[in-house]
Structures are given as C-alpha cells and as structure tokens.
Amino acid sequence: MLAPVAVFAGFAALAGWALMRNDPDTLPSTMIGREAPAVGDTTLPGKVQLTDDMLRQPGVKLVNFWASWCPPCRAEHPTLTELSGRLPVYGVDLKDPEGAAMGFLSGHGDPFAALATDPRGRTAIEWGVTAPPETFIIDGTGRVLYRHVGPLVREDYTERFLPELEKALAAE
C-alpha cells in the first residue's frame, strides 16, 4: 500500500530537483576543472598551428569549435571577432573541407590567433563537443573553466557566457 506513495514521492523529488537546476537544457561538461585535452597537430594552409603549449600560457583564452557548414557558427563569428580584440581566441575547425574553411575565413575574417583542424572529429570527442559551435574558457594553466554550447549571440552571450568570461578574467 505504501509502494505507490513512495514511487510518487521519489518521482516528485526528482522532478523538483530537475526544475531547480540552473539550466535544465544544458548537459554538464566533464571537462570543467580539468586540463584541456590535446588539440591535434594539423592546421589550415598559411595559418598558425594551435598547440597544447598555447593553451597553458598565462592568461585567459578561448577555444572555439566551428565549421564553415555550420549556420550558428556564421551567426557567432562577429562576436568571436570582437572578443579576439580582448584575449586570444583559438579555433578548431571541425570536419570541414580545407577549401570551404579557407573560403569562410577569407570571406568573414579570421578572429583566430591560431588554428587546429579536426577532420575526423577525434579532437571534438576528447573535448566532449556534441556539435559546433562550442566555446571553452581556458585559464592560464590550461584548465577548462567553462563550456558554452551553441552560438555566442543575444541573451545566451550576454547572460550566460559573458558573466563566466568576466569571472575568469577577474580571477586572473
């Protein structure tokens, strides 16, 4: 007789917990607080190769997973260009033909201080990327502080990403 009441109470507690989370639509990243994974050893022609050592240099930096075939990546590109004036923005081009990626950067501008390519998606898997665009805030020791899923635009940028970036810069 008490079993249905216990099951209902358990369900209600679980539902209440889910509703009280900060952002119930976001999957938590296992990378937060951990050292940034390797970024690979390939880049686009004429571009600076992103290296693991760059991620461990002093100062806050961003790592953005993007692709020319990704419409949200196009939408966030002006934001990345603006941010590149404040701090290093590194890019990882995900599953993109070389010509398409080069055309995108020449047509829209290149905000990336250095680039890596990820033609098979192995680097993205190591970072826990589900789909581009995703942007990571990295501290001066190469530790992941924050993961932002989706484009850096509108309220998502101002209300979720920017406060985390400001917090990271203040802690520097």
Image: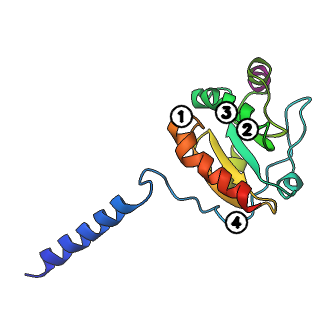
Query: Alpha carbon of mark 3 to alpha carbon of mark 4: how far?
Result: 26 Å
Which residue of the protein is positioned furthest toward the top in this rendering?
A: 107
Which quarter of the figure has residue 49?
top right
State the residue position of label 1.
Answer: 154
Q: Earlier in the sequence, mark 2 or mark 4?
A: 4
Main SS of the magenta segment?
Answer: helix
Q: Residue at x 89, y 33 (%)?
A: 47
State the residue position of label 3.
Answer: 79
Residue 160, position as x, y percentages in the image: 54, 48
Query: Alpha carbon of mark 1 to alpha carbon of mark 4: how far?
Result: 28 Å
State the residue position of label 4.
Answer: 34
**In this picture, residue 160 sits left or right of residue 144:** left
Give the residue type that dot 4 points to.
Arg
**In this picture, residue 66 sits left or right of residue 8:** right
Q: Secondary structure at mark 3?
A: helix
Give the residue type that dot 2 points to.
Leu
Q: Earlier in the sequence, mark 1 or mark 4?
A: 4
Marks 2 and 4: CB-CB under 8 Å?
no
Q: Residue at x 70, y 57 (%)?
A: 168
Which residue of the protein is positioned furthest toward the left in this rendering?
A: 1
Marks 2 and 3: CB-CB under 8 Å?
yes
* Range shown magenta: 99-103
The numbered disc on residue 83 is 2
